[in-house]
């Protein structure tokens, strides 16, 4: 869709990336690190001051003590952390519970490890997990449950009740959790982020994956981290060591300094919530019906009262005809489930959102 957006000079609310610049402070901390000679390999597990800063942040936000030496590994992005977590655990024939709509890397990562994705639809239109369905799908082969909160593409978030259900399902079973929390700081309306990091009993059997690129408006940096128990981290690093070994040094040095100030991350939710609210207000001028978004930088909308086209056809047509690009949500389902829903990314400048909505408002 991004290629089509470029071809038709469309306003791109499709792909998930901000069109405004990242923090000037963070840029200058990285620049300073490079000038100060931090341009060689850092240790395999990551630059220690960065892991220490993350451990502090985790303690402050989630009240959980995480050892920076044995429980945090810096990775080249969130996707890589998820890939490494799954590769650490999965054996051919294992089953992995994956909720759909799902971020596009999950199913291929399960399958490349010879494992079998067991797909469960989130309940449309709130995209909540039906835990009874999960219970029905658990088998002796279930080895992992893949979670994502805040969720791409829907903006759904997990609640404390969801965590209790999860706990009751994995208790006393050899089932691991991979929790994709790359939108950690982008959660709205003062709802607390139900990170697995809040729950030491669950962390014992989890890989919790994060992305600096996603939360600090620099998706092109492809830098993230994985938090787990000391035992699982040891295994995770065996895969990491011979795959990537060590990640970009100056960015880790810059991030360590940046994270020493809580202002680096505390205002992020309200910053993104303002964008969500502005977009919702603008969209009242259109015929789209927006669904609820509680986090991430995505919001979905139905177009059922505009057209009965398949969502892919609809997205292609509005890119070509109206000059606005969105993503058809059916692409996040293996079976192509089409609820006539498209995903908008609102991590954009106000003028970009205004230009897009001005065009969308002309669709009749
Ligand atoms: C749910 C989810 N997980 C992971 C990622 C990727 O994170 P990174 O760019 O750090 O690999 C994305 C990016 O779109 C995402 O939406």
Image (cartoon, rainbow, N blue to C red):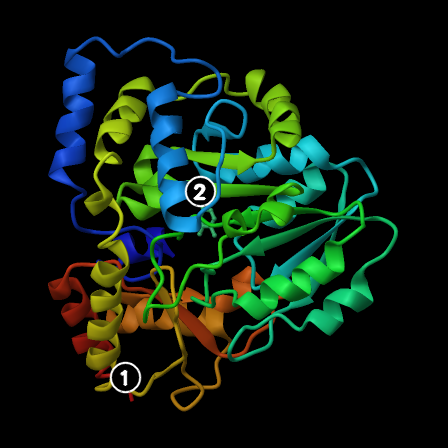
Q: Secondary structure at mark 2?
A: strand
Label 1: which residue? 363
Location of the C terminus (image quadrant): bottom left
From what the image shows, is residue 31 above or below residue 200?
Answer: above
Which residue is located at x 33 percent, y 41 percent? 213
Q: Locate residue 361, reporting x and y percent.
A: 22, 83
Q: Which residue is depicted at the point 48% across and 80% down?
A: 309
Residue 258 picture location, percent across and down: 22, 34
Residue at horizontal 31%, vertical 25%? 252
Which sits earlier in the primary sequence, circle 2 or circle 1? 2
**Residue indicated by mark 2:** 210
Q: Residue furthest right?
A: 140
Q: Position of residue 232 (x, y in %)?
A: 65, 31
Give the spatial CA distance, label 2 vs label 1. 38 Å
Toward the viewer: 259 or 272?
259
In this picture, residue 227 sits left or right of residue 28: right
* Total count of labels: 2
Q: Secondary structure at mark 1?
A: loop
Evaluate whether residue 168 shows in this view: yes
Write down the quadrant of residue 237 in the picture.
Answer: top right
265 or 89: nearer the viewer = 265
Residue 20 point in image, percent of width and height: 17, 50
Q: Quadrant of the N terminus?
A: bottom left
């Amino acid at each position: 869709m991004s290629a089509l957006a470029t071809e038709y000079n469309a306003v791109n609310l499709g792909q998930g990336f901000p069109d405004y610049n990242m923090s000037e402070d963070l840029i200058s901390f990285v620049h300073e690190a490079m000038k100060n000679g931090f341009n060689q390999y850092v240790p395999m597990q990551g630059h220690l001051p960065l892991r220490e800063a993350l451990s502090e942040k985790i303690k402050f936000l989630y009240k959980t003590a995480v050892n920076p030496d044995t429980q945090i590994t810096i990775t080249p992005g969130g996707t890589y952390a998820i890939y490494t977590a799954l590769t650490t655990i999965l054996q051919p024939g294992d089953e992995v519970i994956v909720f759909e709509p799902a971020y596009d890397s999950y199913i291929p990562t399960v399958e490349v490890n010879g494992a079998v994705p067991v797909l469960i639809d989130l309940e449309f239109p709130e995209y909540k997990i039906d835990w009874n369905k999960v219970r029905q799908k658990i088998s002796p082969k279930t080895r992992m449950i893949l979670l994502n909160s805040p969720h791409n593409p829907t903006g759904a978030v997990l609640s404390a009740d969801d965590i209790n259900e999860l706990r009751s399902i994995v208790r006393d079973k050899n089932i691991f959790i991979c929790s994709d929390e790359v939108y950690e700081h982008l959660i709205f309306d003062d709802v607390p982020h139900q990170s697995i990091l809040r729950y030491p009993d669950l962390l014992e059997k989890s890989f919790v994956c994060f992305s600096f690129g996603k939360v600090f408006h620099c998706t092109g940096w492809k830098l993230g981290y994985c938090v787990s128990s000391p035992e699982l981290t040891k295994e995770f690093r065996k895969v990491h060591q011979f795959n990537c070994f060590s990640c970009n040094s100056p960015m880790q040095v810059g991030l360590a300094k940046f994270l020493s100030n809580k202002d680096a991350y505390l205002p992020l939710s309200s910053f993104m919530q303002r964008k969500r609210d502005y977009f919702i207000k603008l969209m009242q001028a259109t015929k789209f019906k927006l669904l609820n978004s509680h986090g991430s930088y995505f919001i979905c909308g139905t177009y059922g009262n505009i057209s009965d086209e398949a969502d892919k056809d609809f997205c292609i047509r509005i890119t070509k005809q109206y000059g606005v690009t969105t993503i058809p949500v059916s692409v996040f389902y293996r079976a192509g489930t089409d609820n006539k829903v498209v995903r908008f990314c609102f991590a954009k400048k106000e003028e970009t959102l205004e230009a897009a909505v001005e065009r969308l408002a002309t669709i009749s």
